[in-house]
Image (spheres, helix red, strand yellow):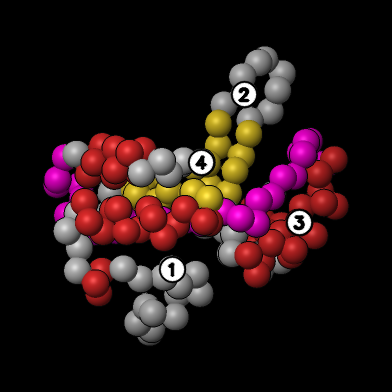
Amino acid sequence: MLTALAEANVNVDMIIQNEPHTAGDGADMSFTVPRSDLAAARAALEPIREELGIGDIASDESMGKVSLVGAGMKSHPGVAAKAFTVLGEAGVNIEMISTSPIKISCVVSEDQVPEAVKRLHEAFDLGADAVRREDVAGDHRPVVS
């Protein structure tokens, strides 16, 4: 499945797989792609659905993502707890969570992104330059030769 998406030049970001709830069922897999890649992703997956045993292909164009990024996260216990508490108290429903040693990403409803960013910004006492839109193309990264 991911090979088909790569061949269609679809940029897959968050990938989350859950174990099946009942024996004989396949695992559920959720992933995010940029909105601009959504049609290409669906077109790449439809022809291989039956072959791979893929059930429904659902998409939600109203999703947004909020991430906390920083190398110091793994040495500061409680970052995730604080982030989830802040978002919960703000009424922001987290639909998916992905973590790494330097990043916590939460998929939320697009209309809740501004409030989530504001609340996390306040909770972690971030400066105005700490809030950036995601650059899925990686254009902000230096070129490595």
Between the residue at mark 2 and the residue at mark 1, the CA separation in whole angstroms equals 32 Å
Q: Which mark is residue 20?
A: 2
Indicate the secondary structure of the residue bearing disc 4.
loop
**Left or right of 53, for residue 140:** left
Between the residue at mark 3 and the residue at mark 4, the CA separation in whole angstroms equals 21 Å
Can the viewer see residue 7 in this picture? Answer: no
Marks 3 and 4 in Cβ contact (< 8 Å)? no
- Residue tagged by mark 1? 134
- Residue tagged by mark 4? 95
Mark 2 Cα-neighbour bin, 10 Å: few <14, some 14–19, many ≥20: few
Between the residue at mark 1 and the residue at mark 4, the CA separation in whole angstroms equals 18 Å
Q: Is residue 122 magenta?
A: no
Indicate the secondary structure of the residue bearing disc 2.
loop
Q: Quadrant of the C terminus?
A: bottom left
Mark 1 Cα-neighbour bin, 10 Å: few <14, some 14–19, many ≥20: few
In the rendered structure, which amino acid carries the disc numbered 2? Pro
Mark 2 or mark 1: whose residue is earlier in sequence:
2
Between the residue at mark 4 and the residue at mark 2, the CA separation in whole angstroms equals 18 Å
- Residue 67 location in percent, x, y? 37, 56
In the rendered structure, which amino acid carries the disc numbered 1? Glu
In the rendered structure, which amino acid carries the disc numbered 4? Glu
- Residue 46 location in percent, x, y? 82, 51
